[in-house]
Amino acid sequence: TNLKWNLTGVGVAGAAGGGGNTASLLHDPLFIYIDANDTLYICDNGNNRVQKWVAGASAGTTAAGDSGGSNGKTAILLDKPTGITFDSMGYMYITDYNNNRVQRFPPNSNSATSGTPVAGSAAGNSGSTNGLLHQPVDVKVDGNYNIFITDMGNKRVVKWAANATIGSVLIDGSSGGAAQNQISNPYGLILINDSLNHVYLSDNNQRSAYLWAFAAANATTQYIIANSLQMDHPSQIIQDQYGN
C-alpha cells in the first residue's frame, strides 16, 4: 500500500506563529509522548517544563518543571527538557539536557512535584565516565525498568539498570566516525521488543536513521534505513500502535 501524509496539518497544542510561557503557549517544543487516551506530553524545551495537553484542550497543564518557565538544578526544576517516556507503572522519565541527568516523576505529577535522578548527576555535573552523562537527549524504559539513553554529548547510547549508580555503554561513537559500530550525534531512539533487542536510532549529525541489534552490552549490527539524501538532522522517532 502506498501511503502519503496529509499535507494540511492541524494544530493540537500551542499557537501558530508565536511562542510564550502561558498555559496555552509553547516555546521551542521538542519530543512528545502520546498516551492511550491521546493525551500529549510535550517537552516544552524553551520553557523548561513538560506540558500535559488533553485531546481537544485549548491549554496545557504543567506535569514537570516550573509552570512559568524558570530553569534550575533543584529536584522540582528542569533545564531544557528534551526527551520523555513512561514506564508500565505510569512513572514519567525526562532527559534534563542541560542538567546532564534523567529525572523520574511519579504519576499525576505537577509543577510542585520533585523528580528523582535515575541516571547521571543529581547536581547537574557532566562527564564521560559511566556514572555521568553529557547532554542526554532521548530516553526509553523496557519492561524490566532498564533505562536506555542517547547520551549525545558523549556520542553514545547507554543503559542504566533499575536502581543502578552507573550505566553501561551499548553503542560508542566517541571516535566521531560513521563506521559500523560508531555514531556521531545519537538523538532519538525506539526499543523494539524482540529477542534480538533491536533499537531504531536517529543520528542528528550523520543525517541518518539506523536499526541496531545489541548483543550483550555491545552493538553488533547496523543497518542504515534512511540517510542524508532523505533526511536533514532527524530528531525524534515515534512508533505507532501498528508498528509503523
Image (cartoon, grey):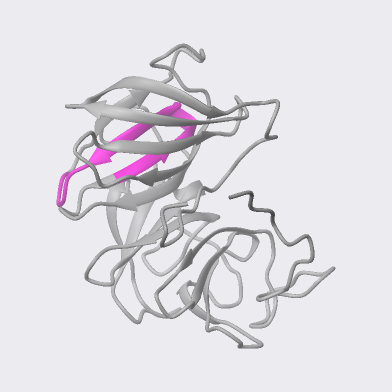
Count of marks, rendered view: 0
Residue 124 at least partly seen: no
Residue 185 at least partly seen: yes
Quadrant of the rendered image containing residue 43: bottom right
Q: Residue at 17% of width from left, 45% of height from top?
A: 161
Residue 151 percent coordinates (x, y): 42, 36
Q: Which residues are magenta?
A: 148-164
Q: Does the segment drawn in magenta span residue 127? A: no
Quadrant of the rendered image containing residue 136: top left
- Residue 54 vertical position relative to residue 40 in the rendered view, above or below: below
Q: Does the segment drawn in magenta span residue 162? A: yes
- Residue 180 vertical position relative to residue 189 in the rendered view, above or below: above
Residue 33 percent coordinates (x, y): 47, 64
Q: Residue at 42% of width from left, 14% of height from top?
A: 180
Residue 87 percent coordinates (x, y): 27, 63
Closest to the observer, 74 or 202: 202
